[in-house]
Every structure is written in C-alpha cells, then in structure tokens.
Image (spheres, helix red, strand yellow):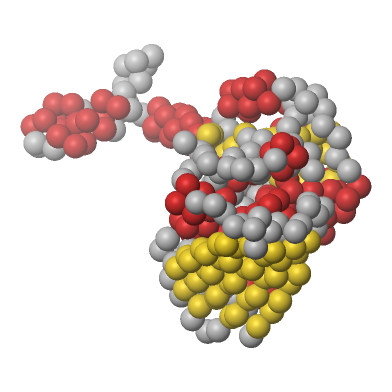
Amino acid sequence: MLISDKQLINNNIPFLYILNNIFYCYFCNTVNYFTIILYLCAAIIIIVYLGNSGKMKLEEICSALNGTVVCGGDKTHREVTHAFASDLMSDVLTVNCNKLLLITGLANMQTIRTAEMSDIECILFVRNKSVTTEMTNLADELGMTLITCPLTMFRASGELYKAGIKPLF
Amino acid sequence: MTFEYKVQGGDFTHAGYASSQVKKMLKQLGVDSVVIKRVVVCLYEAEVNIVAHAWDGIISIVLDTDTIFMKLTDNGPGIASIEQAMQKGYSTASPEVREMGFGAGMGLPNISANADRFIITSEPGKGTTLEITINLNSTAV
C-alpha cells in the first residue's frame, strides 16, 4: 500500500486522496504500483486508439470499398481525415480542408482540375466510373491518387463515415 | 509581371490550364497557400465561365508585390441581368455544361466571396468582363 486513506485525510491532502481512490485495486483491496502501471497502460491504449480513429490510409479505403487504384499507387500510404461527396464542382471549390477525400460520380478532366484548385490529393470515383488516360496523365502530373469503386456514392460515404472519416459540416 | 492566356469557348478538356499555371507560379513565389486558394478559385470559376458561356476570351494577369489583378474579357452572349447572375443558384448554363459539374449558379458568388475587389461588366450580345483583385499579403476573405 502506498499511503492510507486515513493518513491522507488526516494530513488534509484531498488531491492525493482522490488519486489513491482512482488507483485502488478492487481485487487485492489495496493501491499498489502494479495497479498504477495497469491503469496507465489502459490510458495510453485509449489515447493511441482515439488518435488513430478518424483517419484512414488510402490503401485502407481501397480495401474497405473494394476499390481499385488507377493512378498514384505509390502514394496510398497517405491519410485522409475528412471526405466531401459531390458531383457539383462549384460546391467542391467552396470547401477548405486538408487531408480531404473527394467522393464523386463525375469522371472528367474538370474533376481533376477542380481537385487541383482545391488542394485535394485523392479522388474516389463511385459507381464504377471509368477514368480516361488523359485524366490519369494529369493526375499523375499533379501527384494525385485516383481510386474507382463499384459502390454507390451513398454506400461509399456510409462505409467511410462508419470507419471514422469525418464530414466537413 | 504580366501574363496572358487565350481561352476557347466549349473546350472543357483544357479549361483550367491558365488557373493551373497561375497556381504553380504563385507557389514558386512563396505566396501564402490560403491566398493561392482564393486566387485560383476565382480564376478557375471565371475561366470555366468563359469556356461554358462564351465563344472565346482572354485572361490577363498583372502580378506585383502586393496584389494580383486578373482581367477576363470574353466575346460571348453577355449577361442580361448582372444582379440576377450574382444570385446563388441562378444559371443559364446548358445541359452539357451541367454534365461537366458546373452551371449550378455558384460561379460568380464564389468569385465574389473570394475576391478583395470584384467588378463585372457586360454588354448583351457582345461579351462580359471580370476584374478581380486579390491582396497577396492578406488571408482574410
């Protein structure tokens, strides 16, 4: 036992009294270093888990959505924290966020250009949209990753939301 | 520094080329990324407007140490009511333009929201001119 409750109360140290109760082990009815270490480990695990939740690597997104990387396969270690789903490029131009994934069913050169102007590094094309060579050439030049997946925009957004990817608003 | 780009109406494949070049140049000059974003959003929306609505146009960029001034002049049908065109959601875009992801009446309001100074003049039947100024040393919209 580190210090008794009685001692703490007698010495008028409420803070230590609270700590003593936090680290109290109900199995051995005492407070010991093992309990403290155990609780600290649990706290570290929770902090690490919370730190990692809400972001996904592009390769994880790809496997979660049964997607295919069509361009920028060497950059799938990149992480995204937020996603924005739209077929309307003017709407995409209003968003302002780093580590953003654009989910769209619009597959043309202007999708790539819009992503470039919005500093978006990864585009997920839903509904099995085909990406042209012109698009992949431009995306390659800009260092973007393009992924296609067979899911609908609603389903893909739902899966990513469930996995912890955050909406912009 | 002064630059000029020609824009062809209806050419959606190359729409955004001028904006892309300006973005690269501002990056090389070390301009703040928030300011670059505002510049390219204005320029790209305006460039797409020329491609979507006009027959052809010219983009002139004047860059000095404090500001970037962009003038976009097009030969096209012009705008009958600028007041109406500035309203969010108002658009006269064709179905082809909408298929490209534009024409939802967000372009001019987007430009207005990002520019420090925005002047639009138009003569129906002749064309439209946009004058956009952005201070390079300020990030506030």
Residue B56 location in percent, x, y? Answer: 75, 63
Residue A18 location in percent, x, y? Answer: 22, 30
Q: Is residue B2 above or below residue B126?
A: below
Question: What residue occupies the far front of the structure in this picture?
Answer: B125
| A25 with respect to B17 (left or right) | left
Q: Which residue occupies the foreground of this view, A33 or B56?
A: B56
Figure quadrant of the N terminus of chain B:
bottom right
Question: Which residue occupies 60% across, 80% down?
Answer: B62
| A14 with respect to B100 (left or right) | left
Q: Is residue A33 above or below residue B129?
A: above
Q: How many marks?
A: 0
Q: Which residue occupies the foreground of this view, B4 or A84?
A: B4
Question: What residue occupies the far right of the structure in this picture?
Answer: A133
Question: Which residue occupies 66% across, 55% down?
Answer: B77
Q: Is residue A96 above or below residue A39?
A: below
- Regarding residue B128, the answer to whether it shows in the image is yes
- Regarding residue A77, the answer to whether it shows in the image is no
Question: Which residue occupies 82% across, 28% down?
Answer: A128
| B49 with respect to B132 (left or right) | right
Question: Which residue occupies 67% across, 36% down?
Answer: A87
Q: Which residue occupies the foreground of this view, A100 or B23?
A: B23
Q: Is residue A86 above or below residue B62?
A: above
Residue B61 location in percent, x, y? Answer: 63, 76
Residue A169 location in percent, x, y? Answer: 47, 36
Figure quadrant of the C terminus of chain B:
bottom left
Quarter-of-image position of residue B71: bottom right
Quarter-of-image position of residue A81: top right
Question: What residue occupies the far top of the structure in this picture?
Answer: A27
| B18 with respect to B64 (left or right) | right
